[in-house]
Image (cartoon, grey):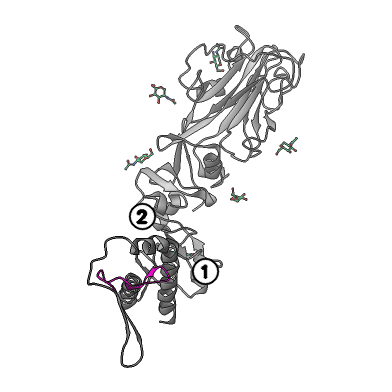
Amino acid sequence: MAQLDFVAVVAAVVLLMGAHGTGAQHSNGGGGGERRTGEEPVITTDDAGNLMLESGWNGRVFVGGVDVMAKLQAIEDQLAATRACAAEGKLWLGERCVSAVPGLDPWNPASTCEELRLRGFLSGEYYVGGSSPAPRVMCNMTTVPATNYGGNGLSAATAGVSCLSIKQHHPPLDNGTYWVTINGSTPFQVTCVNDGSIELEVQGSEFSSTGWIFSFDDPSNFFKCNCTAALSRLQNLTGNWYTGTIPPTTLTRECEAYFDIDYRSAGQTLTPQQVTAIASLSKDRDNRNFDVYTTSCDDDNNVAPLGHWIGVETADGSGNFTIQDCSSGDGGLTRPDPTVANGINIGCCDHAVTDTFASFPFPLHACASINTGGGVALSFSARTLRIKENP
Ligand SMILES: *[C@@H]1O[C@H](CO)[C@@H](O)[C@H](O)[C@H]1NC(C)=O
Ligand SMILES: *[C@@H]1O[C@H](CO)[C@@H](O)[C@H](O)[C@H]1NC(C)=O
Ligand SMILES: *[C@@H]1O[C@H](CO)[C@@H](O)[C@H](O)[C@H]1NC(C)=O
Ligand SMILES: *[C@@H]1O[C@H](CO)[C@@H](O)[C@H](O)[C@H]1NC(C)=O
Ligand SMILES: *[C@@H]1O[C@H](CO)[C@@H](O)[C@H](O)[C@H]1NC(C)=O
Ligand SMILES: *[C@@H]1O[C@H](CO)[C@@H](O)[C@H](O)[C@H]1NC(C)=O
């Protein structure tokens, strides 16, 4: 009760201070020409010696610019609201009755599940977060610190931690669009699959729906090596696919053509931050349905070594592209795993990209380099990509 009285007193003081700011307008109006004759204000004292004020004709009494009667009415209203909330065991917070206990009301959330655990709460759903209204999340109090399993994903305000978390802690999870906030990201929408996976669709290039192709020239292009593993992944070849994108210069042993790899989920292109957040769910091959490969087709028989490769940027905006290649640019003769080791100056090298960039297994920015004839490609083993964390 002490806390409720305090709230009411603070509310009254705040109201009085607010009234001071506008008081000048009221007192100015008091001197206007509206006064009716025969209704002069009266100042008297009662029998006990108390000062008695009576307004001239409109019932209002100003003291120091404050409309005392209106102010008393406001305080009475506040007290009535406060008492009405208190009858339900709640606090009046200016606009609404709110649970006095943090975590039980979206307008009075606990800051973390751990705060609730320390207050002795059991596992269950609570309102947790740094803003009001806060999302309703599932807290597991049997871990130390308590674990926040997130919300049901049906709105931004109840974003889930991941599709799998929604499936496990707010079932059922149907195929469809859900809101997630992964590792503290701003809530965003993804497509969930009812096994708990997040589903993304890689947005391919102008040459293939599942890959990027770069060639030296035509006919000395990526396809001359017949890199069958890569060709089986490069779906829906379109455009001048037999040529691909020719880098403006060659023989530099540097990045020559840059490309961005976009991913869509829930009908929207994901930002690099969102892709990186999704990637943080798992780096484990068992938790996804795809691999990403770089493939080089090299025909120079070691004349220009280190020349054919694709690099992936280590983190969005880092400008640091690390080479993803099994053994760059030496004609297929000395490759560790040539798919065509034929001694005729043509060779393929097929390399599954490794966990050397922040958004692995989703490369975001990459570059291609070709020194002489042949080409390079980056390809996905699937166009519809699924990933989930360990259960
Ligand atoms: C809470 O965490 C414990 C320990 O990890 C686990 O055994 C238990 O199943 C979890 N409870 C719920 C409701 O998920
Ligand atoms: C959910 O989506 C998965 C993956 O696309 C599909 O295999 C499954 O049949 C779908 N289930 C339903 C009930 O639509
Ligand atoms: C290839 O294109 C067809 C027709 O546009 C489409 O239905 C199919 O999904 C595409 N396949 C891939 C792997 O992109
Ligand atoms: C490409 O390689 C496959 C498998 O090795 C073979 O069957 C096919 O004939 C080759 N195609 C060409 C054009 O060399
Ligand atoms: C989660 O976010 C924190 C802070 O942004 C970051 O340091 C950490 O690396 C992230 N964890 C993963 C697995 O990405
Ligand atoms: C580029 O990234 C790689 C892999 O993370 C790292 O080993 C290397 O030091 C980085 N190079 C520069 C110049 O930052």
* Structural crowding at the residue carrying mark 2, measured as other residues with C-alpha within 10 Å and reported as few (<14), some (14–19) or many (≥20): few
Residue at position x 38%, y 50% from top? 155
- Viewer-nearest residue: 282 or 343: 282
Report which quarter residue 170 is drawn in: bottom left
- Relative to 35, say whether 262 is above or below: above
For mark 2, give the secondary structure: loop
**How far separated are the C-alphas under marks 1 and 2?**
26 Å
Which is nearer the N-term, disc 1 or disc 2? 1
Give percent across and percent down for residue 373: 67, 11
- Relative to 10, say whether 295 is above or below: above
The magenta segment? 54-69
Q: Which residue is mark 1?
A: 115
Q: Is residue 213 visible?
A: yes
Q: Which residue is mark 2?
A: 171
- Viewer-nearest residue: 72 or 182: 72
Q: Amino acid at mark 1?
A: Glu
In the displayed structure, does residue 320 sit left or right of residue 122?
A: right
Give percent across and percent down for residue 236: 45, 20
Q: Amino acid at mark 2?
A: Pro
* Quarter of the displayed picture in which ligand 3 can be seen: top left
For ligand 1, tell me if the residue under mark 2 lies within 8 Å.
Answer: no
